[in-house]
Amino acid sequence: MELPTDAGTLEFSQYSYIILPLNNQHSHVDCLLTADGKDYLLHLVFPNYPSHEGCTINLSYDLKCVIRNEKGFEEKILQGFNSVEELIDKLGNLIKDHHKRNLLCSNTEKPSVATNYSKVLAEIDAIGWEKLSSVNHDFTELKLKMYDSLNHQHILNVKFNNNVPEFFTEYPRNVNIEWQEDTSTLSEMYSLFCQEAEQYQDFWKAMEELDAGCWVLEPENPSRRDTYRKISIAPNVSLKIEVDPNHPYVFPSITWLGSETAVSKFRETILDRIEVWDNDLPINTNLERLLEISLPLKQTLDMGTENYEVTCCICYSERLNGEVPSRTCDNPNCGQSFHIFCLYEWLRSLIQTTRKQGNKVFGECPYCEQPISCNPPAS
């Protein structure tokens, strides 16, 4: 049994169909059958391709409505076809007869999500099939890809809800895509998606430089949407950097993480030398100039150097839900670090020694018993 290597269309007198292989092995195939302007979709699985033995057929809701009064029809088509074209021909003739008898399912029986398959396929055709990254079996969700001027791949996720698409991207800011039901096209939205990518080239370049030039603690697996980095500065001292996507090389918003004793000297150094910042240099280079240090790189730290790994003294792990310990005891003789979640729950459990002010809890350090406080973890 042969299938076309790409999406192809065949037409007869009263109906037409498109066969769309979903993988290179041709073991999963979508078929779109259009009769009298109405679309019907079926999904075929060929576990033993090119043989049709063991084939399974999944029918769209409308197509099930057409054949549900034909007792035994599904069993017949499973046993009696030698090619996809023969199967489609049988279904096409059945649908034509059904239309003649005017036995279409009532609109009230249709599911809440329906897709105009012909329109979606025409939109993909206009954009280019090479831009299609993936599509689900009923064409209600698809992913379109593009490559920007720096050869970064970006994915536009499209989800159809009652034929109205919703769009999702991994850009640092939401893309203002407004869909006008009567006039907008998927091709126009894709063009806007491509244009938006170009305005973030400097931002993505700045974040790549930051990832390469220092030890990034969080996020563990950065996406193109993430606008922050938490980097290691010294043992038990880290810095959270929030970068403006529209002005990535200006001085960023920063938050020091560590005991007050440990971070105070770094904070004062930056305040004293802020004029050294140069908007033409990478962020990590500017930080090294401001702090007059070399930022640690995890891959180059020798075994004999100071221990930069920070472990929570409550759960004894480095990461909890992808986050590193970010609250440190201010006692200079202690300086132990904790995950916010761990410390907050620890202090809340000490009913006799803990007090609250708003959502903030106060108590004793689990390690040295000196006073310590903690805000609730971010939800």
Image (cartoon, helix red, strand yellow):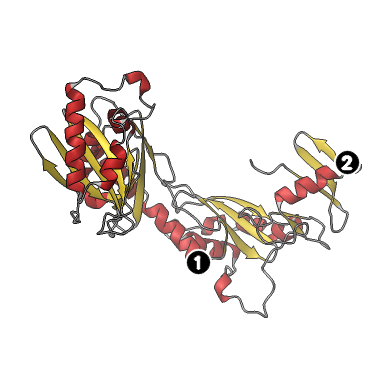
- Of residues 258 and 310, the one drawn nearer to the viewer in this rendering: 310
- Residue under the image location 92 percent in, 42 percent down: 352
Tag 1: amino acid: Gly
Residue 90, given in percent of the width and then of the height, sits at 19, 39
Quarter occupied by the N terminus:
bottom left
Q: Which mark is residue 351?
A: 2
Q: Earlier in the sequence, mark 1 or mark 2?
A: 1
Residue 298: image quadrant is bottom right
Residue 184, given in percent of the width and then of the height, sits at 25, 30
How many residues crowd around disc 1 within 10 Å: few (fewer than 14), some, or many (20 or more)? some
In this rendering, the answer to whether 214 lies above or below 81 is: below
Question: What residue would you read off at disc 1?
Answer: 213
Assign a secondary structure to mark 1: helix
Tag 2: amino acid: Ile
Q: Is residue 23 left or right of residue 101?
A: right
- Residue under the image location 21 percent in, 35 percent down: 118
Q: Which mark is residue 308?
A: none
Assign a secondary structure to mark 2: loop
- Of residues 284 and 292, the one drawn nearer to the viewer in this rendering: 284
Residue 227, given in percent of the width and then of the height, sits at 49, 49
Q: Is residue 206 visible?
A: yes
Residue 19, given in percent of the width and then of the height, sits at 21, 46
Q: Is residue 366 left or right of residue 172?
A: right
In this rendering, the answer to whether 300 lies above or below 311 is: below
- Residue under the image location 45 percent in, 54 percent down: 249
State the CA–CA distance, disc 1 to disc 2: 45 Å
In this rendering, the answer to whether 36 lies above or below 1 is: above
Q: Is residue 273 left or right of residue 66?
A: right
Quarter occupied by the C terminus:
top right
- Of residues 80 and 216, the one drawn nearer to the viewer in this rendering: 80
- Of residues 313 and 216, the one drawn nearer to the viewer in this rendering: 313
Q: Is residue 125 visible?
A: no
